[in-house]
Amino acid sequence: MAEGALIDGKAVAAELRESIGKAVTTLKASHNLTPGLAVVLVGEDPASQVYVRNKGKQTVAAGMQSFEHKLDVSTSEADVLAIVEKLNNDPQVHGILVQLPLPDQIDSQKVLNAINPAKDVDGFHPVNAGRLATGEPALVPCTPLGCVILAKKVAPSLSGMDAVVIGRSNIVGKPVSQLLLQESCTVTIAHSRTKDLPEVCRRADLVVAAVGRPEMVRGDWIKPGAIVIDVGINRVEGADGKSKLVGDVHFDECRAVASAITPVPGGVGPMTIACLLRNTVQAACDANGITMPAI
Ligand code: NAD
């Protein structure tokens, strides 16, 4: 069998950002509306700093307003909550993202719960999680949305597929499962206590791996012809002693069996910010009673 097709997340994300840019141009011209995204970063975690910088750059590149709040690592919970409240009340800010993880003195859930659900472009507020679960219009978490967009690039209808999601986190596993249910997949959510995970995986037409364990999913776990979406981002030492990124899926083994697979890097990763920009446009339109231009 020929090796599986590569699902190029970098290219799909670039297309998405281009169509978001066009939608923003339309909103500015027809409604004098410029979507705005505020990002709150507490502390100096290097990975978070890179994410926040990229988010800011891509927000501006799409023609939107970017507001960055960089706070000292010792900032109190009360001060972070006060900033969130200010952003909730700022009409130029349509989306608010608080970069995780937050330092220990701050209760992350309390901060996430303080974001106005209408501006919760990360989709982590319980109101948006509940709306997603009940099928009401919601702001949907960005990485899960990216996974489904990529899967639909190779299989426009996922209806009736057996989908196995490995991982049950609130930011990836659970919301991606809800989205796949909405796509009419038969969804199994596997996790660290699942018995015989390889056997569970083998029945999947679509595997989404969101575990955080390098190359855990092996080739003989994959049903021939299945679609594999790898969310994992793990830094490991390569054979040459240099550090490199790998996913939760053993790429070469699984590609040999799958019909299509996302690489790491260059698969799900680039979709996250693109979906964040999309959500910001959606939030801006909803706040102003405007139908979102096609994206
Ligand atoms: P998490 O640690 O919150 O959750 C991991 C899940 O994996 C848990 O639900 C756990 O039950 C399950 N698990 C752990 N060990 C397992 C095992 N041996 N067998 C089966 N299941 C097991 O992680 P997360 O935040 O959901 O992230 C998962 C991965 O996705 C990480 O590598 C993370 O870096 C990556 N990630 C990527 C993006 C992106 O591409 N933009 C975004 C978020 C997360």
Image (tube, grey):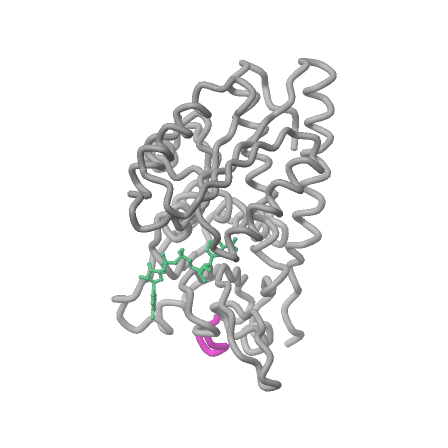
Residue 251 falls in image quadrant:
bottom right
**Where 96 falls versus 167 (above or below)?**
above
Residue under the point 33% across and 43% down = 108
**Where 22 falls versus 160 (above or below)?**
above
Q: Position of residue 202 (x, y in %)?
A: 42, 70
Q: Position of residue 107 (x, y in %)?
A: 29, 43
Q: Position of residue 134 (x, y in %)?
A: 34, 33
Q: Nearer the viewer, residue 216 or 49?
A: 49
Secondary structure mostly seen in magenta is helix
Q: Quadrant of the C terminus?
A: top right
Residue 86 falls in image quadrant:
top left
Residue under the point 65% across and 22% down = 34
Q: Position of residue 273 (x, y in %)?
A: 58, 45
Q: Nearer the viewer, residue 186 or 279?
A: 279
Residue under the point 48% across and 74% down = 215
Q: Where are the magenta residues, as a range? A: 218-222
* Quadrant position of ligand 1: bottom left
Query: Number of numbered discs present?
Result: 0
Residue 128 falls in image quadrant:
top left
Q: Nearer the viewer, residue 154 or 104?
A: 104
Residue under the point 60% across and 79% down = 242
In this picture, residue 77 sits left or right of residue 211: left
In this picture, residue 30 sits left or right of residue 84: right
Q: Is residue 144 magenta?
A: no
Q: Nearer the viewer, residue 180 or 175?
A: 175
